Image: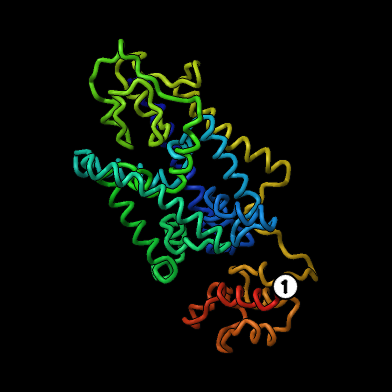
Amino acid sequence: MKGNKWIQWLRLLFLFLILAYVTYESSMHQVLGGGKAPSAHALCPYGGLESLYRLFATGSFISKIFAGTMILFGITVVLALVFRRSFCGLICPFGAIQEYSGKLGKKLFRKKYILPVKVDQPLRYLKYLVLILTVTYAWKTAGLWMSPYDPWAAYNHLSAGLGSVWSEYAVGLILLIITILGSLLYDRFFCKYLCPMGALYGIIGKVSPFRVVRNQSLCIDCGKCNRVCPVNIDVQHCYNVTTTECINCQTCVLSCPAAGALESKEGKKNIKPLYIIILVMALFFGSIIIFQAAGIYQVIPEPLKTGEVIGFDELKGYMTINEAAEGTNMGIKEFYREFKIPEEVPSETKMKDISKVAPDYDFDKIKESLKEELK
């Protein structure tokens, strides 16, 4: 077990680097705008699931979602088919926040807290309800309707200031705080109880040949696998860990003091934890590199060409009023009139920031009403 410690630190390092990258890109999105840096939604595979119905129905994506988002979603589905919820345990940046919060909590409280089974088990089904609700309404509204309630979106807009986050993501910010505080006490709080993608990957992973196997004859029943599991699986009393709760973090296998008592298997083949981590990273990032090389991995919009005219549904919140007017081939006064923009709002204002000057203004609602009028 001691010789495996560096592999556990390697996994944590990968999680940190991925979290740092996404945090940086989201900060740049706030500073440079959506035309130069991707949004949190564009870099989250869940956006691909939310956009799936519209893609098949109309051949287009919902707002803030691009081809790259759909590719991310597809890659993570493949990962779930091969290695179960490995995206959750080895790549997910929001999972990283919870994991580091959990480690801080253990340092602070010197104890690992676990909810009573009678409370824990029913709560585990909440994430499936969240999955159904968010997908249903995303497909029904053809938009990211859940964005204001999304703790991940709230986190990625913190660089804009707490005031801005509170005005746009109040519920999401509250859930972010609950998630971090919850993870201080209970490992992977959001993953266990609320994450819709975790629910989806868990369902898909049921057909995966991957599993953790406990060799009963070699097990010394020390219970360490149970104590280190971040999602509180009773590994000690399993023969095969095939539950949808397993996030394939490999912590139990790496922490087991009895050689060979716990093994990770893909079908009948035993795979060492280090190789699993490498394979998952290679499949995920290697696929992205291939799609980038093919020129189809897009997470930011193509810049408007000189003289190009766009429709109302293609207007983005990061555009200034001047850019939006020019893109729709409208005079600035006409644009103000059509979009009911108050005259006191400067034309250099981004469309998504008009509400900061005119609190009652709702860009998305007005855009949708104009689209309906044109039908």
Q: Is residue 22 above or below residue 301?
A: above
Residue 48 image position (x, y, % from top left): 58, 50
Q: How is the image coloured?
A: rainbow
Q: Compared to 253, does 136 lie above or below? A: below
Nearer to the camera, 301 or 243 = 243
Amino acid type, callout 1 = Gly
Q: Residues within 10 Å of mark 1 (few under 14, many from 20)?
A: many
Most foreground residue, 260 or 318: 260
Residue at image x 70%, y 55%? 59
Q: Which residue is mark 1?
A: 327
Would you say residue 107 is visible in this rendering?
A: no
- Where residue 280 appears, as percent x and y from the top left, is 53, 31
Q: Position of residue 203 (x, y in %)?
A: 46, 38
User: Can the viewer see residue 326?
Assistant: yes
Count of numbered marks: 1
Viewport quadrant of the C terminus: bottom right
Task: Please state which of residues 156 and 82 is positioned toward the viewer in this rendering.
Answer: 82
Q: Residue placed at 33% from the left, 52% from the top? A: 179
Residue 282 vs residue 248: left or right? right
> Furthest-right residue in view?
307
Q: Hey, which quadrant is residue 155 in on the image?
A: bottom left
Q: Quadrant of the N terminus?
A: top left
Which element carries disc 1, helix, strand or loop?
helix
Q: Quadrant of residue 50?
A: bottom right
Q: Residue 15 at what x, y percent from top left?
A: 44, 40
